[in-house]
Amino acid sequence: YREMLPINRDEEPVSLGEGGTPLLALERIARELGLDALYVKDESQNPTGSFKARGMSVAVTVAKRLGAKAFVAPSAGNAGGALAAYGARAGLPVRLYVPRDTPPLLIEEMNGYGAEVMFVDGLIDDAGRLAAEYARQSGDFNVATFREPYRVEGKKTMAYELVEQLGCVPGTILYPTGGGTGLVAMWKAFGELERLGWIGGERPLMIAVQSDGCAPIVTAFARGDESATRVENAATRMWGLRVPGGIGDRLSLRALRESGGDAVAVSDDDADTGMNDLHRLEGIDATEEGGATLAALRRLRVGGATLKRPIVLFNTGTSLKYAPRAGAK
Ligand SMILES: *Cc1c(COP(=O)(O)O)cnc(C)c1O
């Protein structure tokens, strides 16, 4: 998809083979829900085990070309692991600011790729402030969500792949939403495909899924607000969704509304059940955030919502980094 990305024709991208992930049909779960066209886009199969790889490949490629000598970013876990790996691939140092309670395997991954990890007493937005301050002082390139344009560009490829794999525009996309880059990137990509004449005006219903312990987008969507209000005491085991306040809120809310979509909060326990079902019934290495999309679909089916087919659930990452989980259920 080079022609659609800010990658030059003759440029060697900083790549680890990201993207090209499978779109897996769900048979048993589809039967349970009385659905015929239900899929998981399995982003756990990316380098470093999450869709964050797509964005970091493009961001690191362009920033390096523009002269970046070092990278800094805040992270709830997967973004840090991905930046650490792509920084190593580019031969440039990485410093990460992460909440102190981030699960140990995520930290080990960052350390393993040689990144310097700074612990923060607080959440991702507190980490974001420290990362921005450090970037100002040091001149390092800040790769924080929505502080530079290239991570979103890289994540557009998820939408291109869906259209290519399905042979049509998906009817409904359920996406676990933290900062909102994935949603915003796919919405942008569908617009580009229409301008190229490859699709018409049809669009998927975009449905944001959050944890009921941290659901700023769901709350703002329900209220009809244009931006989100920061959630105090945000708490969820879904680390990628523990984003208490406005990062990509305006753009995410606009995409949800323009698509005719929705925003749904589920409990961490229901997300766990969804995750375990994807593992046991379908053999998919779903993370809790991925499981949350199945929990949201079940909720919407029970509520009688009409969803356009085909329906795509996003499994945004691997479950393995949130261990220890052995013996849990
Ligand atoms: C980062 C992350 C998310 C949230 O992604 P956004 O596109 O920033 O909203 C969801 N799931 C996982 C596993 C993540 O790492």
Image (tube, rainbow, N blue to C red):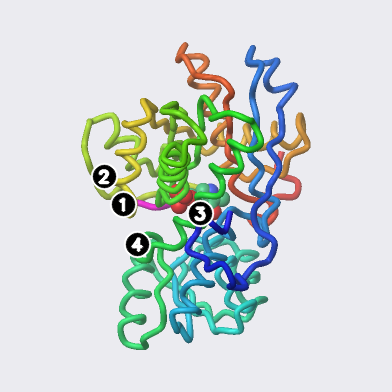
Q: Which residues are magenta?
A: 241-246
Counting residues from the N terminus, which is met first, the one under dot 1 or under dot 2?
2
Mark sitting on residue 25? none
Q: N-terminal of the two: label 3 or label 1? A: 3
Report the residue marked by disc 1.
245
Element under disc 1: loop
Q: CA distance from mark 1 to mark 2?
A: 6 Å
Could you tell me if the residues under marks 1 and 4 are in contact, i.e. CB atoms within 8 Å? yes
Image vertical order of residue 302 relative to residue 98, above or below: above
Q: Earlier in the sequence, mark 4 or mark 3?
A: 3
Q: CA distance from mark 4 to mark 2?
A: 14 Å
Report helix, strand or loop for mark 4: helix
Q: Which residue is mark 2?
A: 228
Please tell me which of labels 1 and 4 falls first in the chain: 4
Residue 86 colored in magenta in the image = no
The response on whether ligand 1 sits within 8 Å of label 2 is: no
Amino acid on which the number 3 mark rests in the picture: Met
Residue 258's spot in the image, x, y percent? 32, 31
Amino acid, disc 2: Ala
- Identified by mark 4, the residue type is Asp
Give the alpha-carbon distance from disc 2 to disc 3, as whole Å. 30 Å
Quadrant containing the C terminus in the rendered view: top right
| Residue matched to label 4 | 125
Disc assigned to residue 4: 3
